[in-house]
Image (cartoon, grey):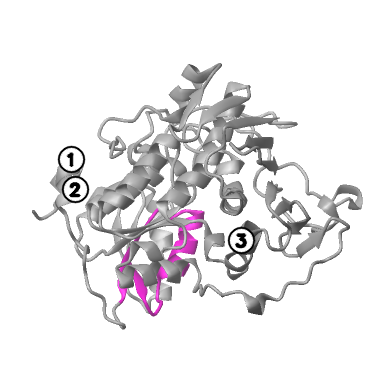
């Protein structure tokens, strides 16, 4: 059945699934993958840079409910693509009905990530979805199910999965060969640029160029507030996931990847929005602690107020002054510091002969995704939907503990809270959807 705008506006999963546009397509060495970038804000520019005018892809379409963003990004695409003008869409359902589009690269606010990815997969489009892949635990589960059910490539936008350094060092950390078995990971996210006091603003009419209905998409309806758009939605639970789900998800993903313990059995997330007198909801200072079934642990710290080198005192004496983000791992016989390497318990560097270990070839996050698409092999992505769910899910668990104001116990297999406060906490594993924009239950 041919996909049409009418079919997509019906939001029928059965019709969406019928739209086999690029499933099973055989790619020649010189063929280019036609990409639609969904979400043309700040991160959308990076997606355009990654896919426009390259040897293996070009951006043939843009989609955003903000016409101002569409116009400005269209000029960027033309510049990078030798004057070729992209098609412009406000509604992703119209873009998905276009057979010219092979893949959708999603750089929207968080509340759109999963629905955009699922709709694209159902329409036979390959998917690159920004971090966090989901807005809550339920959505992460549906991402995994979509990746398993539909024959398309889906990659998560945690770029460290494509990092030569991490592809080299994570297996060494997990093997225990250098510093013994890991018992703790620590992630740091100390960013304050663009994360200051927002102040307080009243609800108002949305800008004329912004389709507020489409911008909200799956989120239950609220009146427009100037604090939500274009960037500060991050700090409101209705649309974002706070700093731990923004920049923090990159370092959180590295912690989760290295520890390789699955979901925790306990989470305790504390903090606050210190010194700010604004309307935002998420913490600017936050410490989340995770305990796993085997007793190992992970600690994640968010600080939007100051750097980590006040008075010259730096984290573990290893990170350089001015560093904003980073990761540390602790084993029985030593520890590891991102960018510095391995150390023994007396703080002496441990030399590593990397020539003894196999190297994983990486072309970078954009090219890795394109290579997987051309190979028609979902296993070749660097950051699959199971990885997306695990790292994003850790952020969601921390957010729930913070909002509940209590330490929570969790069943990592059932992916449900247990014990005291479980009923209230489990309600926060999903959310209410706007009619016609429901994330379908696939798992």
Picture quadrant of residue 12: top left
Question: Along the polypeptide, which appears first: circle 1 or circle 3?
Answer: 1
* Mark pair 3, 2: CA separation: 39 Å
Q: How crowded is mark 1: few (under 14 residues within 10 Å), some or many (20 or more)?
A: few
Q: Earlier in the sequence, mark 3 or mark 2?
A: 2
Q: What stretch is highlighted in magenta?
A: 32-60
Q: Which residue in the structure is indicated by mark 1?
A: 12
C-alpha distance separating marks 1 and 2: 6 Å
What secondary structure is marked by label 2? Answer: helix
Q: Residue 16 carries which label?
A: 2
User: Residue 387 location, x and y as percent?
Assistant: 47, 51
| Camera-nearest label, 1 or 3 | 3
Q: Nearer the viewer, residue 386 or 212?
A: 386
Helix, strand or loop at mark 3: helix
Q: Are marks 1 and 2 in contact (CB under 8 Å)?
A: yes
Mark 3 is surrounded, within 10 Å at the Cα level, by few (under 14), some (14 to 19) or many (20 or more) other residues, namely some
């Amino acid at each position: 059945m041919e996909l049409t705008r009418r079919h997509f506006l019906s939001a029928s999963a059965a019709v969406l699934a019928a739209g086999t546009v690029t499933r099973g397509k055989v790619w020649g060495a010189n063929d280019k993958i036609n990409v639609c970038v969904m979400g043309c804000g700040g991160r959308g520019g990076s997606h355009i840079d990654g896919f426009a005018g390259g040897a293996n892809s070009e951006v043939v379409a843009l989609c955003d409910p903000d016409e101002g963003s569409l116009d400005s990004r269209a000029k960027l695409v033309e510049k990078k693509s030798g004057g070729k003008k992209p098609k412009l869409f406000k509604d992703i359902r119209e873009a998905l009905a276009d057979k010219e589009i092979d893949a959708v690269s999603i750089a929207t606010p968080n509340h759109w990530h999963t629905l955009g990815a699922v709709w694209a997969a159902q329409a036979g489009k390959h998917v690159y979805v920004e971090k966090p892949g989901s807005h809550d635990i339920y959505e992460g589960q549906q991402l995994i199910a979509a990746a398993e059910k539909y024959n398309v490539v889906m990659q998560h936008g945690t770029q460290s999965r494509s990092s030569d350094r991490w592809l080299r060092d994570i297996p060494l950390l997990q093997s225990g060969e250098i510093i013994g078995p890991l018992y703790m990971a620590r992630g740091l996210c100390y960013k304050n640029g663009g994360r200051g006091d927002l102040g307080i603003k009243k609800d108002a009419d949305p800008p004329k160029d912004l389709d507020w209905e489409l911008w909200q998409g799956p989120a239950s309806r609220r009146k427009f507030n100037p604090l939500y758009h274009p960037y500060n939605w991050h700090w409101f639970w209705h649309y974002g996931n706070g700093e731990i789900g923004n920049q923090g998800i990159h370092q959180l993903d590295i912690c989760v990847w290295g520890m390789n313990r699955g979901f925790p059995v306990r989470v305790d997330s504390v903090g606050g929005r210190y010194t700010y007198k604004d309307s935002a909801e998420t913490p600017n200072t936050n410490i989340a602690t995770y305990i796993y079934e085997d007793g190992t642990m992970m600690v994640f710290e968010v600080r939007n107020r100051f750097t980590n080198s006040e008075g010259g005192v730096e984290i573990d004496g290893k990170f350089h002054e001015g560093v904003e983000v980073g990761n540390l791992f602790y084993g029985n016989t030593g520890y590891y510091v991102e960018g510095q390497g391995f150390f023994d318990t007396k703080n002496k560097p441990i030399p590593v002969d990397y020539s003894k270990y196999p190297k994983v070839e990486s072309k970078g996050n954009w090219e890795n995704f394109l290579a997987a698409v051309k190979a028609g092999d979902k296993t070749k992505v660097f950051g699959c939907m199971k990885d997306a769910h695990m790292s994003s899910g850790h952020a969601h668990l921390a957010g729930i503990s913070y909002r509940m104001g209590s330490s929570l116990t969790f069943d990592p297999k059932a992916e449900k809270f247990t014990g005291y406060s479980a009923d209230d906490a489990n309600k926060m594993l999903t959310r209410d959807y706007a009619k016609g924009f429901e994330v379908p239950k696939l798992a």
